[in-house]
Amino acid sequence: MMYNFPREVECESSDGMMKVSLGDVSTRFLKPDDGFFKRIESPHINSDFEVEHLTLEIKIKNLLDEAADLIQAERFSRAIEILDDVLFYDSEYAEALRLKSRALYGEKHYVKALRYYKRAVCSSHDMADENYQKCLLKKSDEEIASFPMIKRNIYAGDECFADGEYQKALINYKKSLLIPSQAREKILFKLYNKIATTHYKLNEFEDALMYFNGSLNSLNNDYAWYGKGICEYEMNVGGACESLSHSVKLTKSQLLKKGNVLNELGCYARALETFDYILENHFKEDKIYSEAVKGRKLACSDEKNEFILC
């Protein structure tokens, strides 16, 4: 099987297997049809940062293989931690989504496992497994039937939210608030975040801000700081720059939004930090990359478009 690798890549074959190397990093020996090899073909690699892009792709592939080994050893929790790092790098990495589904299945979180399986298949039809899907559907139905009422309402809210039925989602989420239980107290910050995000989707920024503040009162968490800052920006009430500075552990899309808002607010130094963080972890020439490059250029200029050392 022939691949169009960038010239920096060294390729080695042995017993029908292949591995690639770049400097002091290399993959394991892999089957020639491993999807990784298509990922690093020249058309998919950022020509302005070939070495950096390829190096990171190889490191991410090694993390993916480590996670697969951990799942085989039934160390599911550690595998999920690693897969979350891979999915931060590429949220649609089909193999990572498939493996996270398997790890969640191993931890008996069947509903979540089904969601990740569906995402994996949407990303690549090669991930489809009819027998596994049937098993997931059966197990997830059984898990839902065993949910306590509070969790059943949250699940119903999640399904409505995913379908864009935000008013129905709110009804179900807020029903959960009315059910006193020890379990509710443990997840109260997440529940507040779900309610706040749904209000935000409905452009109800004041209500969203109230619930993001409630989440922070329950537990200090990055997503609530992010939501609080975005709401403050939308409402033009001040404090957005400071709130957003507390939010670090976010998805790349959220980081992009954060950086753009910081630019809008004139908080250029903090915006620059945000865009640099994205671009250190993202080389694929897609919308996130182009928007981050654009945002970084703006962050490097003052209001008179004079260049600032950065």
Image: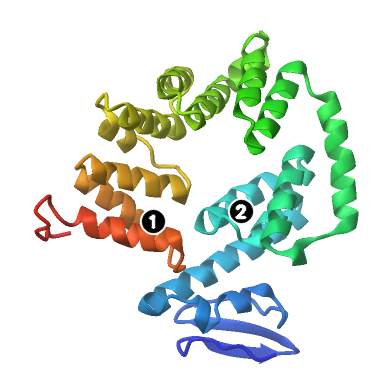
Say which residue label 1 marks.
Answer: 278
168, above or below 241, in the image: above
Question: Relative to 231, is 43 on the left or the right?
Answer: right
Question: Relative to 260, is 35 on the left or the right?
Answer: right
> Where in the figure is residue 52, as x and y percent of width and height?
40, 73
Quadrant including the N terminus = bottom right
Question: Residue placed at 32% from the left, 50% from the top?
Answer: 274
The crowd level at tag 2 (other Cα within 10 Å; few <14, some 14-19, many 20+) is many
Question: Residue placed at 44% from the left, 44% from the top?
Answer: 254
Question: Residue placed at 27% from the left, 42% from the top?
Answer: 262
User: Which quadrant holds residue 169?
Assistant: top right
> Where in the figure is residue 246, as x and y percent of width and height?
34, 34
Give the alpha-carbon distance from disc 2 to disc 1, as whole Å.
18 Å
Between 157 and 50, the one lying in front of the other is 157
Local SS, label 2: helix
Q: Do labels 2 and 1 touch, CB within 8 Å?
A: no
What type is the residue that disc 1 sits on?
Answer: Ile
Say which residue label 2 marks.
Answer: 83
179, above or below 2, in the image: above
Question: Relative to 262, is 9 on the left or the right?
Answer: right
Residue 227, visible in the rendered structure: yes
6, above or below 188, in the image: below
Between 73 and 187, the one lying in front of the other is 187
Local SS, label 1: helix
Question: Residue placed at 59% from the left, 68% from the top?
Answer: 61
> Where in the figure is residue 247, as x and y percent of width and height?
38, 37
Quadrant including the C terminus = bottom left
140, above or below 180, in the image: below
Is tag 2's residue or tag 1's residue first in the polypeptide sequence?
A: 2
What type is the residue that disc 2 sits on?
Answer: Leu
Residue 281, visible in the rendered structure: no
